[in-house]
Amino acid sequence: MSSSDLPASCVIFGASGDLTRRKLVPALYHLVKEGHFPAGLLTLGVARRPKTDEQFQAELLDAAQKYSRTKGVDPAVWAKVASRLGYVQGTFEDPATYAALKSRLDASAPTGTRLFYLAVGPDDMLGIVQRLAEAGLLAHDPASGRRAHVVVEKPFGEDLPSAHALNQELFKYLSEDQLFRIDHYLGKETVQNLAVLRFENMIFEALWNRNHVSHVEITVAEDIGIEGRGKFYEKVGITRDVVQNHVLQILTLVAMEPPLSLEANALRDEKVKVLRALRPLTGKDVGKEVVRAQYTEGLVGGETVPAYRAEADVDPVSKTDTYVAMRVFVDNWRWAGVPFFLRAGKRLSRRLAEVVVHFRDPPYPLFPESSGRSANVLVLRLQPDEGISLRFDTKVPGGNMRIQGVDMEWSYGKAFGGGGPEAYERLLLDALRGDATLFTRHDEVEAQWRFIDPIVQAYRDDNAPLSFYSAGTRGPDEAERLLVEHGQAWRPLL
Ligand code: BG6
């Protein structure tokens, strides 16, 4: 039986929220449209505001129309979705909400997998899981075909102790194989392609080590600001919002050893090893290895945007980081001595996520420096314009030995016509199927915090001064220093 024939239901907590509208509903629509989700999938939204099933359906149709990756919504497909789309009104604290939910589920989808998607803030997560368990909704017995899976959003904890405590609390009600901790970067096609590129193509993997790689850059740059999330940002900053999860996840996929298989635990075992091999950054070293910064007023896309400190709900003397760059080392046999430069920033000149692998110079320079030699560079562009490019040197036609770097380019859009699935489509489908390969395991998320906590502590202790950069630029000049010490420069953002 394919997953599209299985009886199943999906319950979304936080059904009136932004994540539901922007990501989950379009994903649901496409999964049904493409036949990946059972057409008879029962979807129930749970939220506080009173509304009827019909009002909820109209609201979600509007969301699907606005945010679906294809233009418009096919009425026939939507009719299928809507016919099994309902709403349960109630607070997350009230046992009556769960009783109402249970009776709807038992009446309309008594068997199969139940997927509970918690599109809620971190404060609500544990209480919902506890009450689901008390209502008997987390019964999980794969042998009899009854499964309950729970998807939780980031942030997962705010540091190592809280993430550890949260894991322990959740394990009272759920096993690891029922729990799906989202890092939506893992659902991106190009991030998944990192493993394919490395382990299907010997030309790259053979060179993928300290003998041939001089350094690696990982960039997650955004042109948007904090999008009205001042309260949240004041608490987290970009180091915890983006580096702790997305950037470190990309790093693990770039640096890990070949897994024994693509089975979830085999892959995650290798990723955890990379996180454990990260050289800790603590105390005064953070000031040397990390540049943190905040945006001031500037021009983005021709428009003046306010400084971070002038955003709503932000302290006018806030020291929150909206940009961070750091030099890290993976202390193991493969990567000893190879610096990995990580950077993430809001309100930069453009949106760009990429991995750049710089190869070493030839051992003996046969051609003079002045001839235009450049090192080999492999760029894996994760977004936008997903693709791969490889830079190599070639002779410029003419009587003398002039050399120029040229790029061999491959583009996803051109090769496959673009329009691949959104990250949430893949992740929702995998969570329903019970495949945790693209979700972070408890020890992985804790290892991420173990690395990040001392860095954030050093910010608090003023061991890493806060720099500033104008919105719409490449970030603070101070970040250049990290690479200059290696005789290198960041790949330009512009
Ligand atoms: C989220 C962060 O996890 O990722 C946001 O909370 C950030 O601050 C977003 O903007 C970036 O995701 P994407 O897919 O737009 O690159």
Image (tube, grey):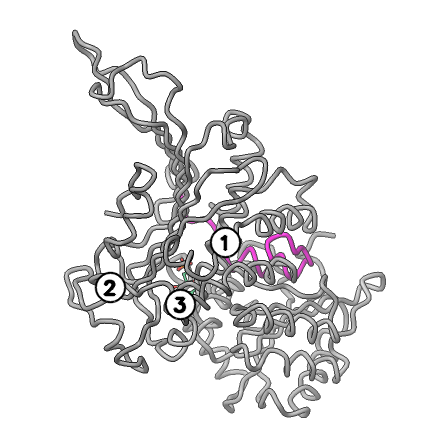
Which mark, residue 240? none
Quick check: marks 2 and 1 in contact, CB under 8 Å?
A: no
As drawn, 440 above or below 56: above
Which mark, residue 248? 1
What is the three-letter code of the residue carrying label 3?
A: Tyr
Spatial CA distance of label 3 from label 1 is 19 Å
Which structural element holds mark 3? helix
Q: Quadrant of residue 297?
A: bottom left
Spatial CA distance of label 3 from label 2 is 15 Å
Is residue 9 visible from the viewing direction of this image? Answer: no
Q: For the point 28% across and 59% down, which residue is it? A: 223
Span colored in magenta: 417-439
Q: Earlier in the sequence, mark 2 or mark 1?
A: 1
Q: Nearer the viewer, mark 3 or mark 2?
A: 3
Which mark, residue 459? 3
As drawn, 285 above or below 131: above
